[in-house]
Image: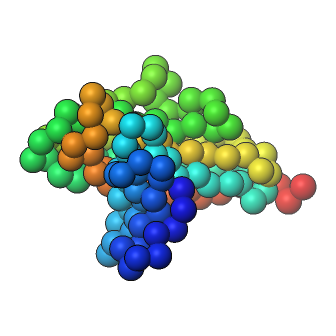
Amino acid sequence: MIWNSDGSYHWRGSHNYDAIWMYNNTLYIHPDTDQSMLEWEAPYAGTVQIDGNVRKYSTLGGDGVTVSIWKNNTLVWPQDGWRTIPYNDNVGLSYDFAFDVSRGDILSFRVDEGGDNAYDTTIWDANIVYNSYRSY
C-alpha cells in the first residue's frame, strides 16, 4: 500500500477500494479483490498478549468479510481457519491470547472480502502488549 497524499489520510492498495486509515482513534480496513492487512514487527523477543475486537463498520449491505491474525504467514487466530463476520454484524469477534515472538516476527491482521467488496469497511481494535521480553 502507498500513502494517499490527497488529504484523505488513507493508505491505498492497487485496487479502487483497498484502504487502511485511522479516524478518531479507530482503525478502518477495507479489502478489494485481495486481502488488506496491517502488520506489526516485533522489536524484540518475548511473550506478547494480543486482545481486541474486529467488526463490520457498515451494516447496510454487502456479504460480509473474513478475518484472521497471522504470525510470519502462519495462521494463529482463529486456529480453525478464517472467521466470517456477516454483513450486519457490528458487534463482531473478540480475541485474547498470548504467544512467543522473536525479534523481527511479523504479525498481520488480515481482512478479506466475501463474494464482493461492497460495504466491507471493517473496524479492527488490536492491542499488543509484552508480558515478558528478552533483549537479545
Q: Quadrant of the C terminus?
A: bottom right
Tally the marks.
0
Left or right of 71? Residue 26 is left
Q: Is residue 57 above or below residue 77?
A: below
Give the residue at x 21% y 47%: 119
Question: How far across and how far down the image is residue 45, in percent?
Answer: 79, 51
Which residue extends farthest left? Answer: 60
Which residue extends farthest right? Answer: 136
Which residue extends farthest bottom? Answer: 7
Q: Quadrant of the N terminus?
A: bottom right
Question: How far across and how far down the image is residue 113, in percent?
Answer: 33, 36
Question: How far across and how far down the image is residue 85, in percent?
Answer: 27, 35
Q: Is residue 80 visible?
A: yes
Q: Nearer the viewer, residue 91 or 134?
A: 91
Q: Is residue 87 visible?
A: no
Give the residue at x 57% y 37%: 70
**Quarter occupied by residue 93:** top left
Question: How far across and how far down the image is residue 34, in percent?
Answer: 44, 37
Q: Is residue 5 above or below residue 96?
A: below
Q: Nearer the viewer, residue 3 or 136?
A: 3
Give the residue at x 27% y 28%: 115
For the rendered model, the colour scheme is: rainbow
Left or right of 49? Residue 64 is left
Left or right of 116? Residue 8 is right
Q: Nearer the viewer, residue 129 or 32?
A: 32
**Quarter occupied by residue 101:** top right
**Quarter occupied by residue 81:** top left
